[in-house]
Image: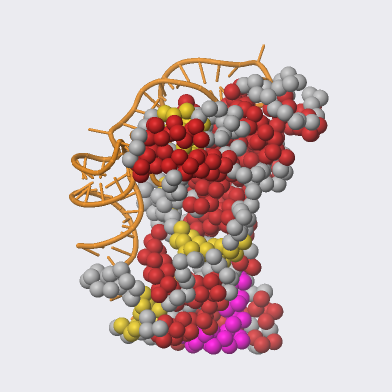
Amino acid sequence: MKSLTDILEHRISRAIEKVTGQPDCPALVGISKNSKFGDYQANGVMAAAKKLKTNPRQLAEKIIAQLELDDICEAPEIAGPGFINLRIKDSFLTEHLLEINADTHRLGIDKTDKPQTVVVDYSGPNIAKQMHVGHLRSTIIGDCICRMVEFQGHTVIRQNHIGDWGTQFGMLIAYLGEKFYAENPDGDLQSDLEKLKAFPIQNLEQFYQEAKARFDESEDFADKAREMVLRLHNQKTDTMAFWQHIVDESRSHYQPIYEQLTVTLTSEDERGESFYADKLADVVEVLKQKELAVKSEGAMCVFPEGFLNKEGDPLPFIIRKSDGAFLYATTDLAALRFRVNELKANKVIYVTDARQAQHFQMLFATAKLAGWTDDEIDLIHVTFGTMLGTDGKPFKTRTGGTVKLKDLLEEAIQRATAVVEEKNPDLSEDQKKDIAKAVGIGAVKYADYSNNRNSDYIFSFDKMLAMEGNTAPYMQYAYARIKSIERKAAGKDVDIASELAGITTLTFTDNAEKDLSKMLIRYDQAIAIAAAECRPNYLTAYLYDLAQSFSRFYNACTVLKANADQRPVRLLLCDLTARTIKHGLTELLGIKVVEQM
RNA sequence: GCGCUUGUAGCUCAAUUGGAUAGAGCAUUGGUCUACGGAACCAAAGGUUUGGGGUUCGAAUCCCUACAAGCGCGCCA
């Protein structure tokens, strides 16, 4: 089914073109902020009038005369300097609702007719270090983008660009070797890989710090670590086995967090820095051949135009250090080539915090200079702000350390458990557990999603779990109430399935029904804008409006005790609201819903 | 010094990218409900959108300027 906004945009734009003879005068159809101006409004007439240097209201009159919208709207009205205000007819609304209702999977939303391949680079944890709160935003915002774009019908390729390569690995491998051989003094690694696989690293953070301490205190150890880096780069079998073990152990720490967050990343999506290790030399070589890379202060650099350093001199994009080692700019260039050439990306979306903005600008500029991308390929850096503590400073533990993501999520669940216990002590222990998980994790994710991603935001358990206002529990609650109605129906001799199946026409008897209906048909628009701008908060704002609209309806209209002629519409509205909320939360935001809470 | 981001109600945040009277939630005040879940609903009050200029039918949004905060600016990622 075509989106209503698209239909209106198309028809009104055509009418404008007919009257003005100008091809590029979009109707600019949007949802009216104030219902007294109608449901939708077209703002494009003023701009068109300006172009033609004519009176906008008179122009609007002429356009309206050409408009064919009888099947959708009441007679359009002109207001203010030249707005065209539209009010949706009940007949259109009810037909539209029935169509949406008939589509069990996609709620009447079409897939795109121009599918693209979109690569999304997000999460990117550092191996050998626990995920901390700084990883939360990239991980869940990226995931939401994937889910939305995929739902639109594009091919999404997730790329978890994990930090699994680099000099710190020499240190880690050397340390792991020390520990392993301490416990297996006669160990012969070649024949003893199984033993290594069973060798646990319980506390990654501690392991890393111990290795670092050894590195700093012992010259012998430091030499060993450097040797390991070399062996790693030369892919020596035993060293690779140790490296693999650290990577695997690390995965066993972050994969459960993905599952807890219902993030769609799997090990299939991992393509870490190590993957590009053998492609880096060529990156530098090609850039040298194209005379884009030059030596400066011993390092190999590209100087894309428009970037200056403190002294006002051109700023380098360093692709090889003076000691000959490659660095993240090199890896990112190799990754970009791979994504364009091998993955056939039409669009690459990077989800990292705003501090890296300049790096990505230079990356994109360099890739373009090299001819590795062109204007046909969209390169987008989706930035986001910092999570702050209630004091307005970067979010830390009381002692000033970084907050581990695992701890944060556990605390959220714990706090949610307390609330469930208070509100609904009679549920079974299993139910309470499930609800606490859904509510606690949902609250953390939703609080993040509902902010404009570019602004820093203050993280507060009390706010997000207050469960009032624009929060996950508010929507989960709306959903649970609908489910409760369904459960009660049987006891009141209402057969929902058969009543819904029999509906061929709908009649509204209450404004709350109509208002809710108008919200329901806007879902497609909310997804479209949220996906286009990579802004999950547009989606949460919609879902909140919808849940509010439902609460008003719920308050104003009885469902099960309604008259036989009113009940089918209301049952349908309940069902459709539940399906929309569920779809938005679970499919697009990755937040669980519960039948009871 | 240059650049990026930000500055909106007492607090936490929106504002579909230039649209009409800047919206929510919390907190405050008052109200609704013997219905299907009160984690609800309705209403009041709260604003010179940091200050000052400008652009135009129209500005929180664009331009200039001052102020304030955060971040980035050669071999970490």
Secondary structure mostly seen in magenta is: helix
Q: In the image shown, does A231 or A118 lie closer to the viewer?
A: A118
Percent coordinates x, y for residue B44 in the rendering: 40, 20
Q: According to the image, what is the colour scheme of the structure? A: secondary structure
- Left or right for A487, reference A63: right
Percent coordinates x, y for residue A374 in the rendering: 46, 70
Q: Is residue A24 above or below residue B31?
A: below
Q: Is residue A418 visible?
A: no
Where is residue A43, by image quadrant? top left
Where is residue A492, by image quadrant? top right
Percent coordinates x, y for residue A149 in the rendering: 58, 55
Query: Residue at the spot x=31%, y=69% of the render?
Result: A307
Query: Residue at the spot x=67%, y=74% of the render?
Result: A198
Percent coordinates x, y for residue A134 in the rendering: 46, 58
Magenta range is A224-253
Q: In the image shown, does A65 or A160 lie closer to the viewer?
A: A65
Query: Residue at the spot x=51%, y=43% of the render?
Result: A14
Where is residue A120, by image quadrant? bottom right
